[in-house]
């Protein structure tokens, strides 16, 4: 029996354990992937802690930014072949026939399975995934870059799409981290002027390097007042896991502005003024990751040189230290495990 190394959540709220597990066999419609890289997303930390109302069932392996090589195919898996390089995203599988799936909103499918949450994910040397829902990684995109693009990239790309941003509009990105450093690039690619908001000068410096027109340190400056002084935001994208940040993002909007909610704080309530929302014609939009087509577009943009991934290499044995780094705000953007 072949074995593999995997990071496992033994129980919610506990430190992860590195275990030797049997390499799984692909079932109907599945492929076995030998992992090359896998990113660390804040969602993985929420999953391990059991922060959200719908909780995963331990023991399980997190990870939904996985990239690797198809090593074996199961029965009825015909879309990908052995040797293909593919990405495992958050959307592990959708039903394919509900109204959401057929209308192009597969990420809203009520029967979906999620990688690293309801099914074991990519923090392992091998992972199973559904042939129908892995996405081919183009040759021009490295496996290291492809990992963060598989969630951080596709999530923020979709957020900017649903924001309906138009060329010349102003987008305020609240939180310049794994998601935010890509969000501001997509806002720029869509033709927007970009304001980056964070509490760390190092991350604001990174935002400047990546094309932000203005940066605001919310630790030392009221971001709402500062953005209003710049004319207000047409779009505000909330990426920090704090309800207060969502409220600040809403407060920064000019009339007709759109708040896009992306992050999922453990404390999931925010307060917004009804009067200002109605009189100002403002919108609040929820955006949850992106579809397989969105991820294909994200890879194509990166292959064309339109985005830059900022990430640091780590190893799976150090998973708990990596989580501590992320929670302490010590990571410039993304951490990526390599195998």
Image (spheres, grey):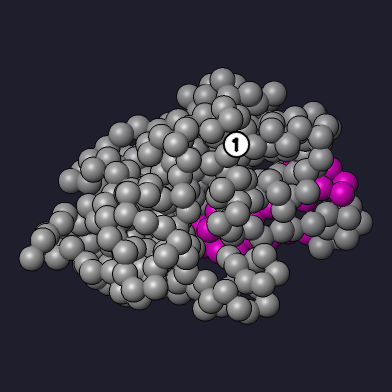
- At 57% from the left and 74% from the top, the residue drawn is 96
- At 60% from the left and 51% from the top, the residue drawn is 294
Q: Quadrant of the N terminus?
A: bottom left
The image quadrant of residue 61 is: bottom left
Which residue is nearer to you in this view: 62 or 231?
62
Q: Position of residue 238 (x, y in %)?
A: 62, 48
Q: Residue furthest right?
A: 279
State the count of labels: 1
Which residue is nearer to you in this view: 101 or 260?
101
Q: Position of residue 216 (x, y in %)?
A: 63, 29
User: Relative to 315, is 96 on the left or the right?
Assistant: right
Please say if 109 is above or below 294.
below
Q: Quadrant of the C terminus?
A: top left
Q: Residue furthest left?
A: 1
Based on the picture, tell me whether residue 60 belongs to the magenta stretch. no
Q: Position of residue 325 (x, y in %)?
A: 32, 40
User: Relative to 283, is 306 on the left or the right?
Assistant: left
**Which region is colored magenta?**
249-273
- At 69% from the left and 33% from the top, the residue drawn is 189
Q: Position of residue 193 (x, y in %)?
A: 75, 30
The image quadrant of residue 127 is: bottom left
For disc 1, the marked residue is: 301
Q: Tag 1's secondary structure?
A: helix
């Amino acid at each position: 029996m072949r074995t593999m190394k995997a990071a496992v959540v033994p129980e919610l709220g506990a430190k992860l354990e590195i275990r030797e597990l049997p390499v799984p066999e692909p079932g109907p419609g599945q492929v076995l992937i030998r992992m090359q890289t896998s990113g660390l997303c804040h969602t993985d930390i929420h999953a391990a802690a059991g922060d959200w109302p719908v909780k995963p069932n331990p023991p399980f392996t997190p990870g939904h930014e996985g990239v690797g090589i198809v090593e074996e195919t199961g029965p009825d898996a015909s879309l990908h072949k052995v040797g293909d390089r593919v990405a495992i995203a958050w959307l592990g599988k959708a039903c394919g026939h509900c109204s959401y799936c057929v209308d192009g909103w597969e990420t809203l499918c009520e029967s979906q399975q999620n990688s690293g949450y309801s099914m074991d994910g990519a923090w392992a040397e091998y992972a199973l995934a559904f042939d129908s829902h892995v996405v081919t990684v183009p040759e021009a995109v490295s496996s290291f870059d492809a990992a963060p693009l598989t969630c951080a990239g596709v999530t923020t790309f979709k957020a900017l799409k649903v924001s309906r941003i138009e060329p010349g509009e102003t987008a305020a990105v609240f939180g310049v981290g794994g998601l935010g450093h890509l969000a501001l690039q997509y806002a720029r690619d869509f033709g927007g002027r970009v304001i980056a908001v964070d509490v760390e000068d190092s991350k604001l410096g990174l935002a400047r390097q990546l094309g932000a027109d203005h940066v605001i340190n919310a630790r030392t400056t009221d971001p709402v007042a500062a953005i209003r002084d710049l004319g207000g935001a047409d779009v505000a994208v909330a990426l920090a896991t704090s309800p207060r940040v969502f409220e600040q993002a809403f407060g920064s909007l000019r009339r007709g502005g759109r708040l896009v909610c992306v992050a999922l704080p453990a404390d999931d309530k925010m307060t917004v003024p009804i009067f200002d929302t109605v009189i100002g014609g403002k919108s609040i939009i929820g955006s949850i990751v992106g579809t397989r087509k969105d991820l294909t577009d994200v890879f194509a943009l990166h292959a064309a040189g339109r985005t830059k991934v900022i990430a640091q290499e780590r190893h799976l044995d150090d998973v708990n230290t990596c989580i501590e780094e992320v929670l302490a705000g010590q990571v410039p953007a993304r951490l990526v495990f390599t195998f």
